[in-house]
Amino acid sequence: MPIDQELIAALLKGHTERREEAQVLELLRRASAPTLDTVLREVDAAGLFRSIDNHWFGPQHRSDLRELLVERLGDLSIEAQANLAHGMQAGHTDRADEEAIAAIFHARQGVELTHLKNRINSRTDAHDLEGLVFGDIGDEAVRAGILEHIATQAAEVETGESKVLCDIDDTVICALHDRRYPRGTIYPGILALLDALDRGPDDDPFSTGDLTFVTARPGDAFGLIENHTRASLRRAGIATHSVLTGTLAALVTHDLMAGQKIANIDHYRQLFPEYRKLFIGDSGQGDVRVGELLLERFGEVVDIVVIHDVVGTPDDERARHAEQGIHFVDTYVGAARLMHERGLIAEAGLERVVTESRGALDDIDWDSDEQREAVVALIDRDAAGIDVHTTPTSTA
């Protein structure tokens, strides 16, 4: 490790005096481009900005740090720039920080900007891209400038992929209305389906981490609820994702829940206009209305709306919704089959969904044999004719 990097790490450890702040600034000023990039890729950027202060009666070291790093954006990789944005986002973000963050976005064009956005969005805490642009950036003019730059540059990018927007309760995990599975069950096949959608139609993705969970669960100022949601999803086996949360007020009615989800999805649409979108929800808490609003407002960029039916929706109602572009499914094998037919996942992805769905059945602590047999029948029905070199699921 270069000596400059070792010194910076040592100087930032613990409480940082003015003299140590000045030393860090001087090391960063005279660092070569490769060293500066390495430092800013690996340093705790939030800790860096916490440690370097503007003093009431003394040097304005934090302002000097911000100006120095903005001046040297051209020396930094996408990874370092994303880390730098997080450093200014994680604590209090003032107007000068917002303008510096905007400069990071403007430093990248075309596909490089797409990669920067994906990198920022890949964080495993509440400080993702949506939180940055629509939360931490408080000045409307700064936000508008970022979004205008995103829209202009996205027009030059062809990803060939979709961002996957997915509900959580009764969509990923049996939680509220579904009586076909024991409460808390991760639905068979859902993890393989989300992975297949992330990989895309050729199983050779332009980008990964294209999964965002849209929930009516409320967010909070410190990201505690959102971080709890992320932790629950990681325990379920979903490591790379972002989360768009709701508000307490939105929990009052299904229409309010739907409205909150649409507002969040609209944010996402503005952040990633170079991607198409698809939505997976359930029939229990307003997601059908979400699908209707999505198709009504953003239908030109929505590939498909899939609703996991947890309340036994009648066939005639399903058919009516299918005419609108909202497709009900009983299993994620059925969802995968539909998405494969639409060219959204590869054949290998479809086969993985079938295999995972059947394999997961033995890991579920069923309430009764009848409950298990009913689900087995649905999965075997939806998997009929899909050759994955496995035998039909046993009900024994």
Image (tube, rainbow, N blue to C red):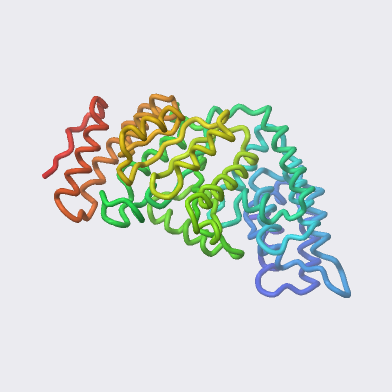
Number of marks in the rendered image: 0
Residue at image position (86%, 69%) is: 59
Tell me residue 317's x, y (percent).
36, 35
For the N terminus, give its image quadrant.
bottom right
What residue lies at 45% left-to-right and 50% top-to-bottom?
239
Of residues 309 and 376, which is closer to you in this image? 309
Q: In the figure, residue 6 lies in which quadrant?
A: bottom right
Q: Kindly indicate the quadrant of the structure image that contains residue 90.
A: bottom right
Q: Is residue 293 visible?
A: yes
* Relative side of 231 to 300, left or right: left
Q: Is residue 300 left or right of residue 23?
A: left
- Taking the view exactly as shown, the residue that stands out farthest to the left is 396
Vertical side of 189 occupied by 256: above or below: below
Residue 174 in the figure: left or right of residue 365: right
Quadrant position of the C terminus in the picture? top left
Q: Give the residue at x 32% y 46%.
A: 311
Q: Residue 320 location in percent, x, y?
A: 40, 31
Please provide percent x and percent y for residue 336. Answer: 36, 33
Q: Nearer the viewer, residue 110 or 288?
A: 288
Whether residue 7 is visible here, answered yes or no, is no
- Residue at the far right: name it: 57
Q: Position of residue 292 (x, y in %)?
A: 50, 37
